[in-house]
Image (cartoon, helix red, strand yellow):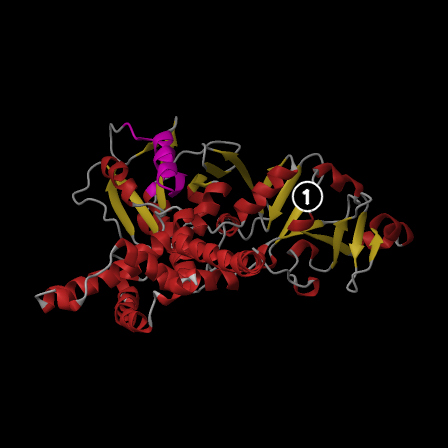
Amino acid sequence: MFLKNKFQSFSTKNSKLLLFPLFIFLCVLSAPSNAGLFNMISKISKTAKNADIDIPLNKLDLPENIKDLTPASIKLGDDGQWKIINKDSSSEQVDSLFKHYPEGTDKVALVIRVADLPSSLQKFDNLPINVPVLIQGKKGRLFELQRGTTTSLIYKKARLPVTSMEAVHDGLWMLQRPSFNKTVRFLQLQTKTASPLPTHRYEGKYAVESVSAEQLFTSMNKLKNQTLVLSGHIINGQLQVSGKNNPGISVEKLKQAAAENDIRLVLLNSNKPNQALNNISRSIAKADKEHSNLHDTAGDFFNRLTDPNNPGMLELSMHHSGKYQVAIQWQAKKMAASQPDVIMPSGILNHIPAHLMIQSIRIYIPDEERSRELDLRIIPNIPSWVQFYFIFSIVLGFFALGTSWGLWRKIWCLKARIEHKNILQFLLLWLIHRLLFLVLFIPLFGIFSFIWLIILIIYQVVNFILLRPSRWLYRRFA
């Protein structure tokens, strides 16, 4: 009877009265300035679309140097032996297979999924050294694990040395991270800039903007979760700004400010900073126009710097650059003999490939743990656990709507219409009462309403099974 009375507190009349403010609440959510719900739905659908689903071996695009080889899936068995996994899920030991068919080592490329990677890098020593080993990443990307005196991860023409399986996982994660956020700002540093840097870009999508050093540091707390691309000549830890007698900007301070504001910081080290920045900006804009950078990663970005006529590899290095920040860097190889700088017209400089004008590139991004937290957020600057609490509270609060309404009426029980002299005052209070229930009580206390509903149900079940029979027996035989 107790539970029944609680449920009846949410009468049919009250439920009808809730429909109008609920309709208003949904209309408010649909406004462009309050599009959080639709952003959440869009993000969830994109996450489902971009799920890491394994691509069949026959559809993998092998690297050019081993394109003629046949891919074979491998996995480390429970007995510590490498096994080739066939299409029918049967397996054969790699050692016995190549022992009976030694000519197969020249025709096969071994492919392993990230989930099947062993715990130790030394496990790969048991595989034939002349057989390529490829790691299948997201969207069918293949990373060659080059073995020898040193072990490296190779993605197309970019090579990243690794020394442990932890470094392999970190390298795979880093090379597959998006190269830029949705908002990319190409900033040209000047000694003096008349107007401050706006929080949002109003010019072309990849236009180069001018900013002074002072304005840059002041604006970084307003540019959260954006990508900043800066160009300059880095000397003794200072990013030199164009202009004479200028001390430059501390790279350490830039890194620290970027880490504090979850900014991806890209530093181009060049003797021709303005031309290099314009070159990179045009390259990204062209790729965006051709839709070739929809799934661009850090590995793809570095591969854009390679010379198509040069078979040499781009040597990368990766290291942690703070508590929640990681850095990946490319350093151009120095020429055998230094040559004096040649003054060229700007028209010619604008058409020189970027890899010829840039001495090094450093990319600083939030580390894996911090990036995972940022990716979980629907609204950028609110912690993910807070957002998920509100989502679950709203869902559970509406699931236990009768209980939620009953508890809300205990907190604020609106007087009847007859007790208000002014009808406008009553209608205003009525509207505020319902709106506060929808936008304040449900998001904050909906979970507790659900818990209270569960307690009531448990009480009713215990009462029906144990307490009522006990009372009946007591009255019957007492």
Q: Along the horizontal axis of the image, is 263 left or right of 296? A: left
The outermost residue toward the front is 478
Give amino acid for label 1. Gln
Q: Residues within 10 Å of mark 1 (few under 14, many from 20)?
A: many
For the residue labelled by badge 1, is the local secondary structure a helix, a strand or a loop? strand
Where is residue 85? Give x, y as percent.
78, 57
In the image, is 131 to the left or to the right of 27?
A: right
User: Mark 1 = which residue?
Assistant: 146
Give the residue furthest to the left. Answer: 421
- Is 253 a magenta residue? yes
What's drawn in magenta, residue-wise? 247-273
Front-most of residues 205 and 200: 200
Q: Quadrant of the C terminus?
A: bottom right
**Which quarter of the image is occupied by the N terminus?**
bottom left
- The quarter of the picture where residue 233 lies is top left
Residue at figure coordinates x 32%, y 62% from the top left = 35
Judging depth in this view, the residue of 54 and 127 nearest the camera is 54
Residue 433 position within the rendered picture, expressed as x and y whole percent measured from the top left: 23, 61
Q: Residue at x 25, y 34 (%)?
A: 243
Residue 138 position, x and y percent, is: 58, 55
- Furthest toward the right, the residue is 100
Q: Which quadrant would residue 206 be assigned to in this image?
A: bottom left
Q: Is residue 238 left or right of residue 51?
A: left
Whole-percent x and y of residue 13?
29, 73
Q: Residue at x 41, y 49 (%)?
A: 352
